[in-house]
Amino acid sequence: MRSVDLSGLPRDARHFIAWNQSEGFDVPFQYDDQQGLLTILRVGKGNHGEAVLDIRYAGRIIPAVPASSVKHCILGRILQTRHFDFVTSLGQRFADARRDYTIIDQRRGRLKSNPRMTQREVLILCSRCSAKTWMAEERVLPPKSCACGRCRYSPLSGKRSIAQTDRWMIPFFPGGEDEARQYTRGQNKKLRFRCPYCGNVREKAIAIATLHHTHSIGCACSWSVGRSFPHRLIKSVLDYLGIHYIQEASRKELPWAQSFSYDFYLPDFGVILEAHGKQHYEEGTGYFKNTLKKNKVNDAQKRKLALDHGIAAERYLEINCKKSETEAIKADLLRSSLSQILKCQYGPWRNTSASAGI
């Protein structure tokens, strides 16, 4: 039988227990084959405003006991019926297909959520990357992936790294490909990424998964703000190939352009590249509702205007960017005549595009 007698504690106007007025009061209890009195020495507040008590029992003072534990007769910590010894031992090794580390030290560490309470912690030495990491003992016990924060998401743990799955992300890592090999695209670890356009390292860290989803780190440079992912991707390819281009070419560069502007103009090749997003192929919603017809009319007018002023039909390229994804844009670039136009001077387009990370 387990029970506590709270009838002797002071109550507030709503007949709830007034814990803040309970200092010095005794609480009788029955816990299996043990019974006695718990003396409330001090009452404080936890991180979330809950009442925490300093309890005296059997000549010992137990700090920071949640009042809810006393109320619901959860007294294992007070009565020392809970097991506080380490389950693991020094030199113990955990090795399987997903982890390989050895426990080299043990300690009782303070909880971040409540510094007055402690937990069992162990220092592990990872055999894969030689990293040493302190963590709660219970984290190393289940047969999960490697608990080492350094190699947990590396290819060695059975997962494919960013360098294998999403090479377009490599320029965002200050350490380049070597650093990208340490992580996967879905990891929530926050890093300070580098803008591949201006080279500045972002002061605020963001999650790797966020970068993979948004294709941007939110840099304030002119090439990051207001530019869509397809535009930034095509720009990266042209920069990698060393091709001179003019973005948003208008009447300043093309006197015949009237009020239009063209996404990319390659003057050395007489090529115009237009990156057409989803709004050029299907009706939008909200602010973009009923804009499909207008977009198609504008596209036709821009094309006719360019062809009437010397741009060859096979050099006016409309790239399908309906899916704002690297592989989809890459596939349409390879299907276009751009590879044939550039092949003679810049080598096979397929090999070059693979090197550029698209």
Image (spheres, grey):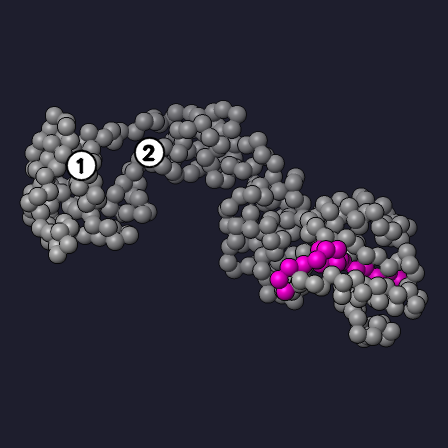
Residue 228 in percent (x, y) is at 67, 59
Return the residue nearer the eye: 107 or 195.
195
Instruction: Point out the image quarter for the N terminus.
Output: top left
Residue appearing at x 13%, y 51% in the figure: 15
The 10 Å Cα crowd at callout 1, few under 14, some 14 to 19, many 20 or more, is some
Residue beneath disc 1 = 73
Q: Could you tell me which secondary element the residue under label 2 belongs to? A: strand
Q: Real-space Cα distance between discs 2 and 1?
A: 31 Å
Disc 1 marks a residue whose amino acid type is: Cys
Q: Is residue 129 left or right of residue 138?
A: right
Disc 2 marks a residue whose amino acid type is: Gln
Please tell me which of labels 2 and 1 falls first in the chain: 1
Count of marks overlaid on the render: 2
Residue beneath disc 2 = 106
Residue 230 seen in render = no
Return the residue nearer the eye: 322 or 129.
322
Q: Is residue 122 left or right of residue 348?
A: left
Residue appearing at x 67%, y 59% in the figure: 284
Dividing the picture into quadrants, the one containing residue 244 is bottom right
Q: Is residue 140 left or right of residue 177?
A: left
Residue appearing at x 12%, y 56% in the figure: 13
Q: Which residues are magenta?
A: 266-287
Residue 113 seen in render = yes
Q: Could you tell me which secondary element the residue under label 1 belongs to? A: loop
